[in-house]
Amino acid sequence: MIGRRSFLRNAAALGAAAAVGVGFAKPGAAGTDCIRPPGALPEDDFISTCIRCGRCADACPNRAITTFTAVTGAPFSMRPGPGEEGTPVVFPRQQACNLCAGAKSEHLCCTAACPSGALRLVRREADEIRARVSMGRAHLDENLCYSYNGRCCGVCIRACPFTSKALRAGMCETPRLDPSWCVGCGLCERACIRYPQAIVVIPDRERRS
């Protein structure tokens, strides 16, 4: 399973980001798009398979999963598209997926709770998460990032569950992305203290098989 110490460190980084980010980051007011929970089928299959039961949201220990409606999407200027009403989504800027850090479940909790197979069962182990989870990919705007503009930050790096893999620190804590390791959990986007945030997750509508 993913190392407990790593997730505790990441949780501390997120707490620090929330404290430092007052006046900069405004959760609920920004974000590129919503993403699907981990283990989701490709989009068309997901929409046709999901029964809109809400069990994945109830099982999520980080309360990251919400039901997609005009109301929940309103702060992000988003409305459900055809067939999306009532399906589960994650708005990373509001609350990111922490890959069940600290949970006692053998599997990612939402995937274990899904009764329809819209979310495929994923073991809570780093190798399997990397192989089977593809919520999206982080995208960095160096023009907005503090560390690329003379103000060392690095909060996103410390928030990443795959630190030194998906995100590693360059000179002055400039974030260096490796897309092959990124699963799109959104922890970097949630942690970013810049407003608008310098790093966002671009949803993966295809996802890994």
Image: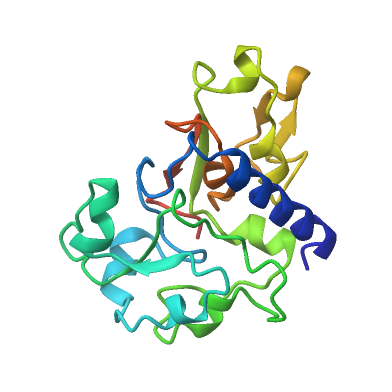
Is 162 displayed left or right of 5 in the figure? left
Left or right of 169 in this view: 180: left
Tell me the residue at 47%/33% (across/down).
197
Name the colour scheme: rainbow
| x then y, percent, for residue 93 | 45, 48
Residue at the (20%, 58%) spot, across then down? 80
> How many badges with numbers are in the image?
0
Is 185 located above or below residue 1 in the figure? above
Q: Can residue 79 be seen in this view?
A: yes
Identify which residue is drawn at 75% across, 19% down.
Answer: 172
Q: Can residue 182 be seen in this view?
A: no
- Residue 1 rendering spot, x and y as whole percentages: 78, 68
Q: Which of 132 and 86 is in front in this view?
A: 86
Considering every residue shown, the one lying at the far left of the view is 82
Instruction: Judge by depth and name the residue closer to the eye, 55 or 95.
Output: 95
State the image coordinates of residue 204 (x, y, percent, origin top left).
43, 48
User: Which residue is at a point 56% across and 23% down the rendered structure image?
Assistant: 145
Q: Is residue 152 above or below residue 41?
A: above
> Based on the displayed image, in which of its 4 quarters is residue 100 positioned?
bottom right
Residue extending farthest bottom = 115
Relative to 206, residue 59 above or below? below
Residue found at the very far top of the displayed protein: 150
Find residue 143 and report its horizontal and vertical position in percent.
Answer: 50, 16
